[in-house]
Image (cartoon, grey):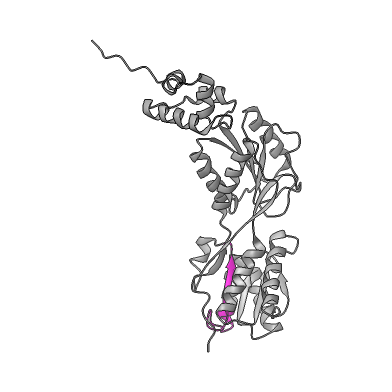
Amino acid sequence: MPSQRPRPVTITDVATRAGVSIATASKAINGRAQVRAETRERVLQAAEELGFRPNAIARSLLSGQSRMVGLLTSDSVGRFGIPVMFGAEDAFGVGEMAVLLCDARGDSIREQHHLRTLLSHRVDGLIVVGQSTDPRPSLSRGLPVPVVYAYAPSEDPDDVSFVPDDVGGARLAVEHLLALGRRRIAHITGPVHYQAARDRAAGVRAALEDAGLTLCGQAWHGAWSQRWGRQAAEMVFRTDPEPDAVVCGNDQIAAGFIDAARERGRRVPDDVAVVGYDNWEVLATESRPPLTTVDMNLESLGRTAAQQLFAAIDGGATPGVHRMPCRLVVRDSTAPAPA
């Protein structure tokens, strides 16, 4: 005679074991705030003893939540958006949330279409990932679910946004060079209409002012490219032939600068130390020499944004633009100044 398959454990079994109502057991398992701590502990212990694993559909019906969130990105290249999304997905996985990903490719019409699609799937909330740190139009007004913005902040100060602290990141770069005894520091960065370029230039200037120093020449603004790094190197050396360090607005500019410096017979890091920005590892680690650079901690930023979305779903959002700390990754393109 074939053995009978054991009956699945239900929420009713958990409620009976814990000595509470089915509604109280459901609230405790789904983390609702209306349950006393000791009652929640008793319910969770009963669920553990019985081996209770809630069915996803039943869980959504009991909690009023779909256990799904939307990730809406505009970063078609993915250089910055992908690490943010990896971090967010890590946090959603811990929270047992399914993730629906849509790529608007920088197109506002496509973005609205994806937004309607995500809402039709009854997502509990949205993370909107931008392609730059420039503020973007808000999507939040009139939506039935909370929205958190990552990398590109919302223009609405009442929204919740997470961005890298580019002013602080540039300060790290300058403070590192100053600690190495470098004093004649130049700055080459991206287009002036980019918020990231302006913030990084502001951080460089502020760190130098705190040390009683000024920038070597001017802040040179151009494209985010190796070509611009090479061109700007010529301008830097023509304006002041003896800079002993350069902070670059991204790793591509830094790689271009190093190429041009080598062609002029300048040794990196002996004659001139170089710091990049972004920690784009495929470039930073293969540069000659490997590049000291600022890492924006984008996976951590994504995880924090996802955790804030959990809080927003439960009604505990913290509005405003939150600037997340960067870190310096030291490699061989920086060294103490020659005696």
**Horizontal and vertical percent for residue 213?**
69, 80
Query: Magenta segment: does it hold 210?
Result: no
The span shown in magenta is 261-278
Above-or-below relation of 111 to 200: above
Q: Quadrant of residue 36?
A: top right
**Horizontal and vertical percent for residue 332?**
49, 74
> Is residue 54 visible to us here?
yes
Residue farthest top in this picture: 1
Above-or-below relation of 296 to 255: above
Above-or-below relation of 88 to 262: above
| Marker count (numbered) | 0
> Is residue 102 visible to us here?
no
**Horizontal and vertical percent for residue 146?**
67, 37
**Horizontal and vertical percent for residue 259?**
57, 75
Query: Magenta segment: does it hold 271?
Result: yes
Query: Of 209 and 273, which appears nearest the observer?
Result: 209
Report the residue at 67% width, 71% height from top. Answer: 204
Report the residue at 66% width, 77% height from top. Answer: 186
Report the residue at 64% width, 67% height from top. Answer: 170
Above-or-below relation of 224 to 15: below
Residue farthest left in this picture: 1
Report the residue at 63% width, 36% height from top. Answer: 313
Query: Of 262 and 173, which appears nearest the observer?
Result: 173
Q: Quadrant of the N terminus?
A: top left
Query: Of 298 and 313, which appears nearest the observer?
Result: 313
